[in-house]
Amino acid sequence: MDMKTIHTLEKATEKSLSSFAKLTLSLLFLLAVFLWTYSSHGKVPDNTFLIIGAIFGAYMALNIGANDVANNVGPAVGAKALTLTGAIIIAAIFESAGAIIAGGDVVNTIKSGIIDINLISDKNSFIWAMTAGLLAGAIWLNFATSIGAPVSTTHAIVGGVIGAGIASAGFSILNWTSLVEIASSWVISPLLGAIVAAGFLYFIKKQIVYKEDMIGQARKFVPILIGIMTWAFCTYLILKGLKQLFNVGFFTAAGVSLILAIIGYLYTNKSIESNLENLSNDRASVNKLFTPALIFGAALLSFAHGANDVSNAIGPLAAINDAILHDGASINASVPFWIMLVGAIGLAIGLILYGPRLIKTVGSEITELDQMRAFSVAMATAVTVILASQLGLPVSSTHIAIGGVFGVGFLREALDRTEKNYVQDIREKFKKHKKELEKNQADLAKLEAVKDKNKATYIKIVDLFKKIDEIEAQVKQEKKDFKEAKGAKYVKREAVKKIIAAWLITVPASALIAAGIYYMIKGIVAV
């Protein structure tokens, strides 16, 4: 399914499921959360903000599903490895599973130390701050999704907590070291993602695509690449996605993943060998070999994302719940199952209703992707997170994924300026075969014009037909190769500017919104 088909599908979906219908379904989800929270916590003292917080947490989860999940499946959809429907189904299942099975048991946003909650004067101020931060992050994500800008949901909720924290206790509440790390991640994350993704794509091009025997080279290198991907993704999943189920060190995770990587290598090698007769010596066949890996990667990324980023929706809600039930703020607030369920269902619903917009942005509106490019982006996400975590560098998985898309796009631009010999070779082959085709067609016309044809003439005619068919197939493939070599290879600058601008203002924008909401809540409650 190409992006034109996706656009057509979106239009059809819009007709069958209007914006009003999507809004209605979202409101029904929020209503269900309200009814559940009210019925299960109706007798809890001061439960008003718990109910409000649950609604805001559900709203935040909807927006995370609509915005952030696109980074996991967008490249696979843009590369046609997954249909839009298939991507939504996979992401919804694995995001929900990650949130429920391996969701955080601590309030990560508070525990990260961006604010000193001991400086908040009382329980009510803390509850108001968490409520304001949660709503502010959700509102900013909602806006970013509406303009098609993939942003970090972690940065959105961090900005909300910062703004509400300042409003409640002043600037002294801030941990400036954490803020510097967040700011540095705006540069480090996309830069590392771009470098790693471009590196993998460059290797694939030089070792496979630009070789005369592409399939032979693919048989040699694709199993190795899939093995590396298996190692990286499994290590990433163990360290980041399953850390709440069991906490292991890097070397243990890497060792277990190495065993799985060997299995992945052997399986891929066997699969390629058994399908050799169905593969042609062209780029399209090489691309097909990366399709299973992209589906595998999209599923694992979705699981890890659900396990980690669901805390951006339910973390502040869990803090509110803990403060109300235990009469005070805590950096180690546990997350009840019902709160994790709210986050998981919200992620899935937000993705299904509003996810296609951002999936399209990530998959096609930055640069055109095929399977090997999307593979490089997926590899960049897993490898960069592992590398950064071991080096202690602050990174955002959202910024890494988008940086990876930037990286493969800019690499294509660079290669476009150095591929003149490759393109010229295709052009010369095309001219040669076209002349040969024209000559054979002329010879065929002469033979067909002969009135008294003998057996030898008919044999020559049949041979010419076969020859012409073969040459026409070669000319068709060369046209395709030439188009791919000289086609649209440029990163869309407007998309880059829009996304970077959204990244830069996410934290301050969420902070300002949160501060305003905090003062509004304080004013209403005081009255």
Image (spheres, rainbow, N blue to C red):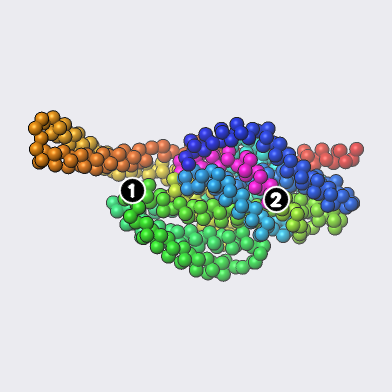
Q: Secondary structure at mark 2?
A: helix
Q: Amino acid at mark 2?
A: Gly
> Which residue is identified by label 1?
282
| Of 252 and 297, the residue lying toward us | 297
Q: Secondary structure at mark 1?
A: loop
Q: Earlier in the sequence, mark 2 or mark 1?
A: 1
The percent coordinates of residue 496 (x first, y second) are 53, 39
Residue 346 in magenta stretch:
yes
> Which residue is identified by label 2?
343
Callout 1: 10 Å neighbours few (<14), some, many (20+)? some
Residue 471 visible in rendering:
no
| Of 414 and 271, the residue lying toward us | 271
Horizontal arrangement in the rendering, residue 479 relative to residue 318 (left or right): left
Residue 413 visible in rendering:
yes
Horizontal arrangement in the rendering, residue 502 relative to residue 47 (left or right): left
Callout 2: 10 Å neighbours few (<14), some, many (20+)? many
Tell me the residue at 52%/38% (across/down): 6
The percent coordinates of residue 172 (x first, y second) are 77, 50
Q: Amino acid at mark 1?
A: Asp
Above or below, 147 relative to 173: above
User: What kind of secondary structure does the magenta stretch mostly adopt?
Assistant: helix
The boundaries of the magenta stretch are: 344-369
Q: How many marks?
A: 2
Horizontal arrangement in the rendering, residue 210 relative to residue 192 (left or right): left
The percent coordinates of residue 28 (x first, y second) are 74, 41
